[in-house]
Amino acid sequence: MAFESLSERLGKAFKNITGKGKLSEKNMNDMLREVRMSLLEADVNYGVVKDFIARVKEKALGTEVMTSLNPGQMVVKIVHDEIVALLGNEEAPINYKKTGITTVMMVGLQGTGKTTAAAKIANVMKKKQSRKPLLVACDVIRPAAIEQLKTLGESIDVEVFSLGVETKALETAQKAMDYAKEQGYDTVVFDTAGRLHIDEELMQELSDIKAFVHPDDILLTVDAMTGQDIVNVASSFHEQLSVTGLVLTKLDGDSRGGGILSVRSITQVPVKFVGLGEKIEDLDVFHPDRMADRILGMGDILSLVEKAQEKMDMEASTKSANRMMSGQFTLSDMLIQYEQIEKMGSLGGMMKLLPGMGQMANQIDEAKADNKLKKSKAIIQSMTPEERENPNILRAGRKNRIAKGSGTTVADVNRCISEYEKMKTVMKQMMSMSKNGKMPNMGAMGGMKNMRAMNKAMRAGKKGRRF
């Protein structure tokens, strides 16, 4: 993912200063030199880096930092805050009208994922923001773009308006607005044409649509893989169309990410959405503070929690958790846990959202882990209800049948059962701790207060204390 190399280098730079009991101008300059090189190697604009370092140094050498009990951590906080400032101090939502139809124009060069991004944004609007969006296929240059948008719209149950390639884009936009009013849509997203480069014909078409639609938002789609060229593209589109927001695609790729840190500072156009994968749901509202946390290796717990609430069957999870804590952990419960993990996405992706787990996540063979999870699911699904409830009855004949039914081997079946026994043992230990007052029961974990109580109890358990 973007920023991985930057995160690693910044982590090393901070490691050399956070352990210092006293901060000096020398070790401060050494750290800032590392930060400067890290940013430049990540492809951040030179002028942006220069101003960034100057601001950090000015604040870090202040009396409040130099005399604090932990000056190293204060410096890390300053760098964090300055990265947030580069990305935009707060999220920039869609400019929805209080009444009437909100219109959004999607613009960008060909190949940046603009059409897919239009559908992904419509999906966010519908599922997370309670809007009723209509997608409009105004890219009449590429017939494939129209078909692609229709396919994507069908997958998220959002209607796509199109008059085909024979009708001009402006006329399509005009008829789409009439249709939206008739059908009671409150949001219209226009997928406009792109080019391999910026030209007069493209800009004139976009200007004509803008003049008629009077969009509440003009969102420019930019590819995170293009590096500093993001700045040039954004500047050109902004100069001619007054872009109101950016949509970053392919942030899950291996780009260095520097262009993202540069574009907000130079163009003053906020990032509104980020794409983190190819699936239709792999796009979300951009949170500058959370991205800064991830860049500095601090994880992103809030995004992980939101992802869990969105993807997981909370009722099934709660029932399964309560059964586990009451000592009723079966292979059926284990299957539920595997299914919930699968819904959350890759193990490595989840680990990257946990503080301090970024480097460990990079060491995981995700394909191997995913294959192992699928095997375990298939094995349990090939068992009878009786076998899931009581695996002690599994003898050679039953194991052979399960292996054949799941397309695995008897060794895989034995491994799955062994994992189940280990998990069951852990659950018994947790239940014992809960009864002894060292952990709150699972049913009480409804809010942050109870989560803090759990952390406190776990720390106390290590020290041998009881609550």
Image (spheres, rainbow, N blue to C red):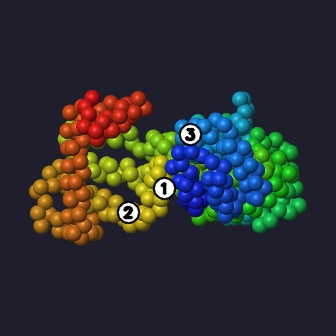
Please tell me which residue is depicted at 47% across the width and 62% down the height of the picture.
362
Please give the residue where the numbered disc 1 appears in the rendered image. Answer: 358
Q: Which callout, 2 or 3, points to the residue nearer the camera?
A: 2
Tell me which numbered mark, 1 or 3, is placed earlier along the sequence: 3
Please tell me which residue is depicted at 78% across the width and 64% down the height of the picture.
195
Dot 1: element: helix
The numbered mark at residue 128 is: 3
Q: Residues within 10 Å of mark 3 (few under 14, many from 20)?
A: few
Amino acid type at circle 1 is Gly
Amino acid type at circle 2 is Ala
Q: Is residue 427 left or right of residue 238?
A: left
Q: Residues within 10 Å of mark 1 (few under 14, many from 20)?
A: many
Dot 2: element: helix
Location of the C terminus by quadrant is top left
97 or 258, which is in the foreground? 258
Please give the residue where the numbered disc 2 appears in the rendered image. Answer: 369
Location of the N terminus by quadrant is bottom right
Can you say whether 209 is above or below 373 in the image? Answer: above
Q: Is residue 344 left or right of residue 186?
A: left
Query: How far separated are the C-alphas under marks 2 and 3?
Result: 30 Å
Query: How far separated are the C-alphas under marks 1 and 2?
Result: 17 Å
Please tell me which residue is depicted at 29% across the width and 60% down the height of the picture.
376
Tell me which numbered mark, 2 or 3, is placed earlier along the sequence: 3
The numbered mark at residue 268 is: none
Spot occupied by residue 354 in the image (x, y as percentages of width and height): 46, 49
Query: How far separated are the C-alphas under marks 1 and 3?
Result: 28 Å
Answer whether residue 451 is visible to the viewer in this image: yes
Tell me which numbered mark, 1 or 2, is placed earlier along the sequence: 1
